[in-house]
Amino acid sequence: MNPRDNLKRLLAPRHLAFIGGRSMARALKRCAEGGFAGELWLVNPQHAELEGVPCIARVADLPCAPDAVFIATHREQTLASVAELAALGAGGAICYASGFAETGAEGAALQSELLAAAGDMALLGPNCYGLLDYLHGAALWPVAHGGRRVEKGVAVLTQSGNFAYNLSMSDRSLPVAYMASVGNQAQLGVAELMDVLLDEPRVTAIGLHLEGLRNVPGFARAAHKALEKGVPIIALKTGVSQIGAQLALSHTSSLAGSDALYDALFERLGVIRVSGPVSFMETLKAAACGTLPAGPGLIALACSGGDAGLIADYAEANGLRLPALDDRQRHALAQILPGYANVANPLDFTTAIWGDAESLRHMLDIALRSAADAALLVLDYPGEGTGERPQCDLLLELFCEALERHGKAGFIASAFPELLPAAARDRLHARGVAALQGVEDGLAAWGRIAAYRQRRDRLLERGESALVPLCPAPVSDGRTLDEWQSKQAMRAFGLPVPQGILSTPERAPGDAETLGYPLALKAVSAQLPHKTEAGGVALDLRDAEALRRALDEMRQRLAASAPGVAFERVLLERMARPPLAELIVGIKRENGFGLALVIGAGGILVELLKDSRSLLLPTNDAAIRDALLSLRSAPLLTGFRGRPAADLEALVAAIRAVADYACENAGQLLELDVNPLLVSADGAGAVDALIRLGND
């Protein structure tokens, strides 16, 4: 079998083996207690039994090749066990031991040996906590865990074993189908696990706790597959700060990468990025039932004006719409509710009908006739000793039934996280209704999921998500092309550049007559990447006398500011007309991640407004257009205050030429800048350009 088929065995095992001591005996017993139906074996050469579990002395003595194995021994013994299991034909092994690539060169060499020993066997880790499989009851895990069997749910992949452990123990009732700690990702990483998990229809969403990605192209392919299937991916990415990035590298030997490039990758693929563990958990819960709302419309119900006010504020803040009730709804609700009820959306139905099943059912049917995409009920359970929980249970059940009758997605949120008890959450999730804890976090989570479906449609139509990002091998620093060489290189790919002549100071007056005034004069040298600061640029020269003076002054300024640079070549170009806008277009390379096309406002705006967007390469025209129109300075392109609109088609084509050059030269290109790219009502053109190439 190939590694992918063996990974499927690991994720749907018929039998399990544990290699190690007493902790593995306890892990085996937890699987049996958790309902795993297949055979279970414990391998230990030193004991006949541990914790009442009989031991098998050697891997070779196992009755058959196990589908899944947890290895909890020191790293040298882990190597030997992996080789024996691969020879036996085991499906997959999880390596708990640390001391591999995360520790340095010696550990990295040992990790390479481990990978070679595994062969075609699926290998998770090393330096990982393992795999919790709640669809089959297989807990390949070294310690206790807080989850239980489910019929369907989310898959959580994390690079932190402790994060996985804490998530499993959290009191949030997240329906988890799988949870994997991926560790060093020697063979199986986030991308490979996602790809196979997406073939399991009972996985309704995927949560990622990432420090970095070692396989960006593979991740992109898997995330596009998720987008096509409509399975949301929710990502909590750490390593945003410089210290966080260093910690990520030392923790699991992962590639932290530039956070801006992760944003670009997630935006391209529809990945929902969250900021912390609570938003991660609640957003996963909002997606866990597998029924996504068609849009942001929400009919919301509460039994107090205070809760209704919170709903209104948090809905608006999270892009959720609250469509008004129609006249028929308002009239019908007025017949049921007291005069002091606020008959609106959000609906404050008060406590006057609390516990009255018939009135509550009628009220819910009237409200849910709304054209809104989903329904929300805010419900807080009092303490168990109050005796008032049965009324809450009644309302919960009636709300679930009403959602089914009206074919609506919906969720319940409590105002305070702790006031939605586990029993209520479990009942809701069994009915396919999200149980969100805290109205603020709940509406934020629902807002993300409600936006996902429409965003997904746009991204699939745009087509960029199907393009696999380039991830060329690192290259050493090489040479910088001068402005003339840079422009000619990109001109061959369609980048418009000003009409110009490469000349010398001696030939410049004659060449200027051929070119015509007004013109720009620039010193040409690969040693002058910043010509303006060195005095190597003169603009708007109107005649031969102005050109002569500019040549003399340029010679003197360069001799003073850059004495090592020979003043031997100059570029003469026709002056461009004043533009509608200036842009900066560049290519940045990050080893291990790929090439990014950066589009930003020109001049001081890019620094003043932090106004730029990044697109990973390759990209397409639709994505370039969307990036341009998402800039803060985009009004300058679309006709600001009566000015003409820019030629957007020409601008997109010019930027695509830069991207095409970069893709064609991805193996060498270290950096590229077109600054500025001038944009007018009838075209776009590069006034200055610089390319830096690496050695092959």
Image (spheres, rainbow, N blue to C red):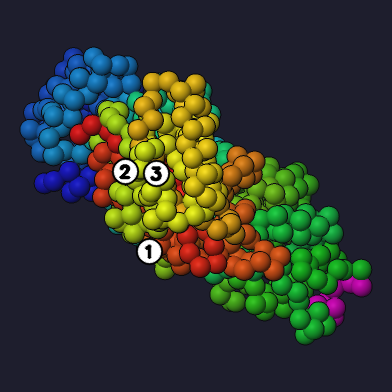
What residue is drawn where x is 23% and y is 48%?
Answer: 8
Disc on res. 182: none
How far is mark 2 from mark 1, CA to CA?
33 Å
Q: Check the picture and name the quadrant holding the C terminus.
A: top left
- 483 or 12: nearer the viewer: 483
Mark 1 highlights which residue?
463
Asked if residue 551 can be seen in this view, the reply is yes
How far is mark 3 from mark 1, CA to CA?
48 Å
Task: Say what amino acid the circle numbered 3 marks.
Answer: Ala
- 652 or 465: nearer the viewer: 652
Majority secondary structure of magenta residues: helix
Task: Say what amino acid the circle numbered 1 marks.
Answer: Gly
Q: Secondary structure at mark 2?
A: helix
Disc on res. 485: 2
Q: Nearer the viewer, mark 2 or mark 1?
A: 2
Vertical position of residue 188 compared to residue 618: above or below: above
Mark 3 highlights which residue?
508
Asked if residue 593 can be seen in this view, the reply is no
* Residue 414 pos. (x, y %): 70, 51
